[in-house]
Every structure is written in C-alpha cells, then in structure tokens.
Image (spheres, rainbow, N blue to C red):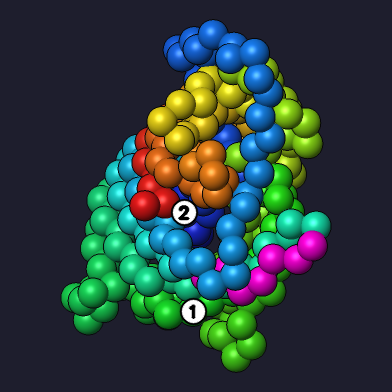
Amino acid sequence: MMNKTFHLFHQIALFVFLCGCGGADSHEPSPPTGEKIKLALNLKPGDRKKLTVEVDSDSKTQVVGKEMVITMKIVSVMDLEVLEVNAVGEHLIKLTYAKMSMDMDGGPMNMNFDSSDPQGSESPMAAVLSGIIGQHFTVRMSNVGKTLGFEVAEGMNPLVKQQIEQTMQNFSLGTTFPDFRVDNGDTWKSAITQDVNAIKITNISTNTLLDQSNGLATIGVSGVMEGEMTGTSTGMIKFDLRTGWIDSGELSMDMSMDKPGLEVKSEIKMTFSGK
C-alpha cells in the first residue's frame, strides 16, 4: 500500500505540473500595451536547457478506516537538448533525468533518497528512483507547447519505463500557448485528460497573459481538476519572450479523492525553474 500511495502522490504532482494546472486569481494583469504578441516555443537545434521541479506535499489518506499523514518533498532535475526543429516549428527534444531526491515522512515507513548518494537508502522505492537517473526520453512539441509524440529509450527497466510513460505522456512547460496573438489581460483555455494508475483526471485551465516586460511573459493559469480526483490551484509562470522557454514559476494546489475504502486530501506547493 505504501508503494501505491507514493506512486499516486508522485504521479499526481507531476501530472499537475506537466499539464499546467495553476492560477493567478490574486494577480491583476498590467494595462494592455496596444500591441498583441505571439507566444511560441522558439528554440534552435543544439540548444540545451535545464528544468528543476520542487514539490512539497502534505497528504492525509484514509485506507479502510486507517489514517496516514504523509509529508513528502521531491526535487527533480532534467537536462533537455533540442535535437531538431522543423519548418512548422515542431521541436524534437531529448530529456534526461539528471538528479532526484525525495524525503517522505509518515505512514508505516519514512524514506529519504538522494541520487547523489543512492546507497544511502535501503527502501525498495529507492531502487526504482535510482534507476531513473541517466535515463532519457524524447518528446515532440508544437510551437505552442502541445505534445505531439513521445518515446522512451529502448532497454529501460520496465518498471521505470512505465512510471516515466505514465507521468510524461502529456509533457508541457507548465502551460500551452494560444494559437492567436495576445496582449495583457487576454485569456485562453486548455484541457488535458490523463489516466494515472487507472485514476482518470481532466484538468481544465484558464490562462491569462498578466504582463510582458523585461524580456519575460508572465502567465496566470487558473486550474480546476475533475474526475476521480478533484481540486483547484493558483499560481504563476514566467517565460522568456524570445525563446518561449520557461523561466520560473510557482503553484499551490488543493486536491482530494474519495473512493470506497480510500480517501485522500492533499495540499501541494510547487516551484520550478528553467534557468
């Protein structure tokens, strides 16, 4: 049960980030500039980037009448390399897990793992996490940040491959861009559905361009999660106006799931950086 609980929280957290669930309810957009801009991913073959995601979660789980309170902190770092960009702006990107750490307290066991010291944990889950480091996959993305295709490297450990495929099948950079030009205050919607260990979740988000200054586009994404797990979230994401690459962001989420014999309530805070 502990392994299943860990997989649930880890994959839900990654799903929320990768599908762009967030919001900017407390942020007012700057006045319109009078000139609409096109937001787009605009990298070049050979460009190398880094993506760091930090997830802090506090979760209360009741399983057949037994309650577990679990606190978890996950930090992951991925190296990205642009392999090619075609004539219509589709990017083929190679992503490699460079580092990962996890601290989990609560439930029937505690666990600490850091990929810089993989022998420091005797947990069975540590073996799975350490097996991810150095593994890579490729994703093809449109110039508005939508995933068009996904492929995991051959020969990967089947369990590791399954975890990566489930969490990365809808890879994005926190949100997707609109097909039309926007100015401060303009909004656009997006929706993504994903199965996470047979738990079907649909994320519906409203995106707002809050500001475009100092070379950065600031986007608020107000998210609502529907399906077997429900929730809301608030946050903000900054992108480089020239390349469309993520600069930084932070999200706060509340989510819950209520199934026969299983009740989960979670509060999650995420920060991420593409610097």
Image side of residue 115 versus residue 62, left or right: left
Image side of residue 93 versus residue 99, left or right: right
Report the amino acid beneath label 1: Gln
148 or 84: which is nearer to us?
84
Q: Is residue 14 shown in magenta?
A: no
Q: Which image quadrant is residue 94 in?
A: bottom right
User: Which residue is tagged 1?
Assistant: 135
Identify the residue at image location x=73%, y=29%.
Answer: 181
**Real-space CA distance between mark 1 and mark 2, rounded to the nearest whole angstrom:** 18 Å
260 or 258: which is nearer to us?
258
Q: Residue 13 carries which label?
A: none
Of the residues under marks 1 and 2, which one precedes in the sequence?
2
Establish if 267 lies above or below 248. Answer: above
Q: Is residue 82 shown in magenta?
A: yes
Q: Give the range drawn in magenta.
A: 81-87
Identify the residue at image location x=77%, y=31%.
Answer: 180
Report the amino acid beneath label 2: His
Q: Which image quadrant is residue 121 in?
A: bottom left
Identify the residue at image location x=38%, y=71%.
Answer: 98
User: Which residue is tagged 2?
Assistant: 10
Residue 161 appears in view: yes
Residue 235 appears in view: no
Identify the residue at image location x=43%, y=44%.
Answer: 247
Q: Do the residues labelled 1 and 2 touch (CB within 8 Å)?
A: no
Q: What secondary structure is the stretch in magenta mostly built from?
A: strand
